[in-house]
Amino acid sequence: MPSDCISYQNSGYFSKLIVDYLNQEPKVQSFYHRFPTLENFKLQMNEKAANFRAENRTVLVAALKKQYKGFQISEATQQNLSLLENAKTFTITTGHQLNLFTGPLYFLYKIVSAINLAKQLKTAYPDCNFVPIYWMATEDHDFEEINYFYFRNKKIHWNRESFGPVGRLSTEGLEDVFAVFSKELGAGTNAETLRHLFRKAYLEHSNLADATRFIANELFQKEGLVIVDGDDSDLKQLFVPYVKEELLQQTSYQKVSETIKQLNDYTIQVNPREINLFYIENNLRERIIFENNTYKINNTARVFSQAEIIAEVENHPEKFSPNVILRPLYQEIILPNLCYIGGGGEIAYWLELKSNFEAFKIAFPTLLVRNSVLLAYQKQADKADALSLTWSDLFSKQANLINKKTKELSEFNLDFSEQKQFLREQFEKLNAIAAQTDASFSGAVKAQEAKQLKGLENLEKRLLKAEKKMHQERLERMVKLQNELFPNQSLQERKNNFSEFYLTEGEGLTTKLFEKLNPLSSEFSIIYLQ
């Protein structure tokens, strides 16, 4: 089987900003606090311990115990909830949307990364405690992003209308979705386990937040995972002073806008608004807009004076929801957190936020790009061997893969670079002669050079095309294998649902993830399945 390793930087699947971050390029170092190394976590612990308010722990634990009411939790999770009251306990946090039945595979990879990092830190710093956190994005509102998952290339879709925060959304109507999924699963012990998990989650819980908590708890409770729902009145009470400042001073808009100007060499992930808060109710999630000295709730008739909206914050903090710019700040206020683990896109927008944290005097966490994984069945690895494919080949763009392998398979040299260089050298001599005559002759020489080079390039393409036809059968097998491992020529982890692999692996799937994933490594993990 292929044995080469693929770094995130060389995979072709990460942005320039994330590649530069992983390489610790000097030009991005001002946008993060500490790079994720075991040694740096000691400094992060010292800073967070000095920065985090003890009373926030009391509120946090009480809120979490209330959130878990009615759920069966493991001894490990119960212990971690209790440990959160201890001043020497810190959290490692990841977050994810409430995708139907977890959505794409990287849901698992995020949480396993957080759990494994917590274990590594406990080994390195045994006098402290480290609790893995899954932050549910219950206050998001884009239902179209989460109302489906793919199973064996079939889109399992939940079709209904949605308004307001998705965590509060009723699970009514999921019986039909369950019927479709159940039919696709077929027979077998693992299929029955998946049916049970879906049924218990969505048909026995009244809202999407509780259903998602149930699934995450079932999958990871043995590892002590603690699940946080930020849509909580008691937790929002801790956020009140920061909401007021956002409403009155628009601090985050100023600070993040300044940072974006400094990031002008990169693609900007998110842009701040003047006020980075939503006003939410069960069926409402709308922006707060400041116009003509009044605060308006977008797309409604609601208007507040300054005094009225401050009173609303104080009396109903649960109605104020941070957007993507302020949610990280809210998280770090209520959690004794050391590290946020996210995908490339998430880490990219976190890199916009450091100056805002400094303005609010909240410790900026260490940022860690989550583990990325390619799951490959042994048969697929054997096919790769038979076709002389490396993982580097399979990660490459499909057109590049085909061209490269065609050239390797050909008995001829399909690269005319040597001939093109020889031609350029000959025309250099002709251009020197032409320079001593009139301009029209010089122009004719340059035109002829361009024509000759174009001719060579066309011959090169025609020969490559002919060789592709000659080796068509073998190349088609390569393409088929790549398409199996990279659906839609993208990363498997961004499309496939875990259930597809759970059918063959059962609990062995998560066991292998825990065994193989090293959160502090910046290489794709290739995990072989039977």
Image: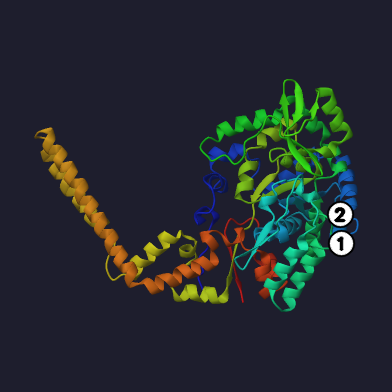
Q: Is residue 400 left or right of residue 79?
A: left
Q: Quadrant of residue 252?
A: top right
Q: Position of residue 59 (x, y in %)?
A: 89, 44
Q: Is residue 377 left or right of residue 393?
A: right
Give the answer, above or below, for where 45 lies relative to 358.
below
Q: Secondary structure at mark 2?
A: helix
Q: Are marks 2 and 1 in contact (CB under 8 Å)?
A: yes
- In percent of the image, x 54 and y 77: which residue is there? 379
At label 2, the amino acid type is Leu
**Farthest-out residue, top:** 292
Mark 2, residues whose alpha carbon is within 10 Å: few (<14), some, or many (≥20)? many
| Observer able to see residue 388 | no
Of the two numbered discs 2 and 1 in the rendering, the one whose residue sits closer to the viewer: 1
Q: Is residue 30 left or right of residue 503?
A: left
Which residue position is annotated with label 2? 81
Give the answer, above or below, for where 157 lies relative to 328.
below
Indicate how the structure is coloured in the image: rainbow
At label 1, the amino acid type is Ile
Between 344 and 153, the one lying in front of the other is: 153
- In percent of the image, x 87 and y 58: which residue is there? 79
| Observer able to see residue 169 | yes
Q: Earlier in the sequence, mark 2 or mark 1?
A: 1
Count the numbered circles shown: 2
What is the spatial separation of the Cα atoms under label 2 and label 1, in whole angstroms? 10 Å
Q: Position of residue 25 (x, y in %)?
A: 53, 43
Which residue position is annotated with label 1? 73
Q: Quadrant of residue 324?
A: top right
Q: Position of residue 39 (x, y in %)?
A: 68, 49
Q: Secondary structure at mark 1?
A: loop
Mark 1, residues whose alpha carbon is within 10 Å: few (<14), some, or many (≥20)? some
Give the answer, above or below, for where 204 lies relative to 305.
below
